[in-house]
Image (spheres, rainbow, N blue to C red):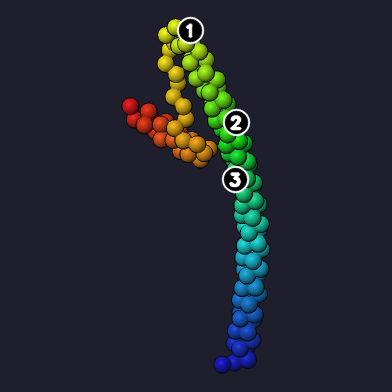
């Protein structure tokens, strides 16, 4: 092999190395940018989930208040029903009391009732 052929071959190898370095740097930069974008999307989605959980917590707190109100009003209505019967009236039937005690049980019971009613 002549000196010019070896020199030309070395130039080709050097150019390939330069091109490979450029491709590697471009790939690294693109990977970095994609990682940054995915990280931002991940943070946004995480925040969205946190907002959903806070809204769910608020609704559960509202359910707790409604359950307490239902119990209080049912007791009041039961007492009123009893007095009406004592006075000789024939009042309408009472709405049913809550069949369970804890908020977890009430929510599970209502979900079951809603599920059963949607099949009807």
Give the residue at x 53% y 23%: 75
Q: Which residue is mark 1?
A: 87
Residue 51, disc: none
- Residue 97 position in % (x across, y down): 46, 27
* Quadrant of the rendered image containing residue 70: top right
92 in relation to 34, above or below: above
Which residue is farthest left?
120
Residue at mark 3: 49
CA neighbours of label 3 inside 10 A, class few (<14), some (14 to 19), many (20+): few
Which residue position holds label 2?
65
Residue 8, position as x, y percentages in the image: 62, 83
Q: Residue at x 64, y 66 (%)?
A: 28
Question: Left of 17 or right of it: where is 105?
Answer: left
| Residue positioned 61% across, 73% down in the render | 20
Element carrying mark 1: loop
Q: Position of residue 80 (x, y in %)?
A: 52, 15
Q: How many marks?
A: 3
Picture layout, residue 6 above or below residue 72: below
Disc nearer the start of the sequence (2/1): 2
In terms of secondary structure, where does tag 2 sit? helix
State the SS at label 3: helix
Nearer the observer, disc 2 or disc 1?
1
> How far apart, in angstroms, are the residues tagged by discs 2 and 1?
33 Å
Q: Nearer the viewer, residue 69 or 12?
A: 69
Q: CA distance from mark 3 to mark 1?
A: 56 Å
**Image quarter hosting the C terminus:** top left
Nearer to me, 64 or 114: 64
Query: Which callout, 3 or 1, points to the residue nearer the camera?
Result: 1
Q: Nearer the viewer, mark 3 or mark 2?
A: 2
């Amino acid at each position: 092999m002549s000196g010019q052929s070896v020199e030309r071959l070395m130039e080709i190898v050097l150019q390939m190395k330069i091109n490979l370095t450029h491709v590697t740097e471009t790939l690294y930069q693109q990977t970095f940018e994609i990682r940054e974008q995915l990280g931002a999307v991940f943070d946004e989605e995480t925040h969205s989930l946190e907002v959903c959980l806070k809204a769910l917590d608020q609704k559960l707190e509202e359910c707790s208040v409604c359950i307490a109100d239902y119990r209080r009003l049912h007791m009041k209505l039961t007492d009123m029903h009893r007095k009406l019967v004592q006075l000789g009236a024939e009042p309408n039937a009472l709405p049913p009391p809550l069949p369970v005690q804890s908020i977890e049980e009430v929510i599970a019971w209502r979900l079951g009732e809603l599920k059963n009613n949607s099949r009807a």
